[in-house]
Image (cartoon, helix red, strand yellow):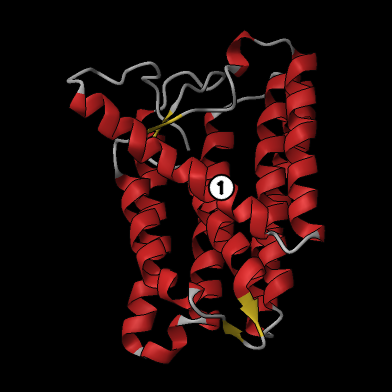
């Protein structure tokens, strides 16, 4: 029992770093350092991926870990991007801007709550039902990194802000399927680490570059889920390759 506690402490510490990065993002955004606020959301996403790998490696997956992970995600991928987009653009709409920005937090929390009551196997994740909240947050972070210049969201990308918020909010609570990291269940731990390394390299590239290319790649990934759903609907087929939900 004591050995399990020490192992779980390691995984939970990684999760705690996710929360800390989310808090730092809010702090930086409040100080109008929007690039660092965006970077902290991306770093939080890295910790979010790492904590699951660490928990499964150490054999410490638990209901407590699931709950802690969801709480951290509400901070880092709900509150942080909502506050970021409010400070960079929606502030100009007054109360309506607050309501609009809060949708990323509220719908993200609903998405996480749905996952928590539906998850069955703590050691296995299938494909995601609805857009994963970290992907939504990274979309906002990369958008701000790419198009916030000279103290504003530059034209014509400023016209994308409201549609983007509405789209991400809807997708998080939708039943549109998004693939988990390529079939991790069937890969060896070595392959998982290699894949994780590739993802981290992409995140680092997003941080050290303007992030614009990666933003469009992420948007393509977001839209792919919608296009696939439409494709299956047109062919009157079931899109049921992954039945489990994600966080």
> Measured from the top left, where is residue 56 in percent x and y?
68, 21
Circle count: 1
Q: Quadrant of residue 213?
A: bottom right
Q: Residue, x 51% and y 23% (percent of image)?
A: 125
Q: Is residue 2 visible?
A: no
At numbered mark 1, what does the secondary structure look like: helix, strand or loop?
helix
Q: Position of residue 126 (x, y in %)?
A: 47, 21
> Which x, y percent locates residue 138?
58, 54
Who is closer to the viewer here, 189 or 93? Answer: 93
Q: Which residue is mark 1?
A: 218
> Would residue 51 appear left or right of 93 to someone viewing this image?
right
The reply to whether residue 136 is visible in this rendering is: yes
Expressed as whole percent of the image width and height from the top left, the position of residue 209 reads: 78, 60
> On the image, which quarter does residue 144 sit in?
bottom right
Q: Using the image, determine if residue 138 lies above or below residue 201.
A: below
Q: At x 76% / y 16%, what residue is drawn?
A: 191
Around disc 1, counting alpha carbons within 10 Å, would you say few (fewer than 14), some (14 to 19), or many (20 or more)?
some
Above-or-below relation of 6 to 103: above
Occupied quadrant, residue 237: top left
Is residue 41 positioned above or below 55 on the image?
below
- In the drawing, does residue 16 fall left or right of residue 181? right
Q: Is residue 53 above or below residue 168?
A: above
Say which of 42 and 161 sits in front.
161
Q: Nearer the viewer, residue 70 or 190?
A: 190
């Amino acid at each position: 029992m004591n050995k399990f506690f020490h192992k779980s402490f390691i995984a939970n510490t990684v999760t705690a770093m996710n929360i800390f990065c989310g808090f730092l993002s809010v702090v930086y955004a409040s100080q109008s350092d929007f690039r660092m606020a965006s970077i902290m959301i991306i770093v939080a996403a890295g910790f979010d991926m790492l904590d699951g790998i660490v928990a499964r490696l150490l054999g410490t997956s638990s209901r407590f870990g699931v709950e802690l992970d969801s709480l951290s995600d509400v901070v880092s991928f709900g509150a942080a991007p909502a506050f970021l987009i409010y400070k960079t653009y929606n502030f100009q709409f007054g109360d309506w801007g607050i309501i609009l920005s809060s949708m990323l937090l509220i719908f993200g929390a609903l998405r996480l709550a749905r996952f928590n009551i539906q998850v069955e196997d703590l050691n296995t994740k299938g494909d995601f039902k609805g857009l994963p909240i970290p992907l939504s947050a990274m979309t906002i972070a990369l958008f701000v990194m790419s198009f916030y210049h000279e103290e504003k969201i530059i034209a014509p990308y400023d016209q994308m802000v409201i549609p983007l918020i509405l789209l991400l909010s809807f997708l998080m609570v939708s039943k549109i399927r998004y693939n988990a990291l390529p079939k991790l269940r069937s890969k060896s731990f070595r392959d998982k680490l290699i894949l994780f390394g590739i993802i981290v390299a992409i995140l680092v590239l997003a941080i050290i570059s303007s992030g614009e290319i990666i933003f469009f790649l992420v948007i393509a990934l977001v839209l792919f889920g919608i296009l696939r759903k439409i494709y299956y609907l047109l062919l009157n087929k079931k899109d049921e390759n992954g039945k489990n939900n994600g966080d």
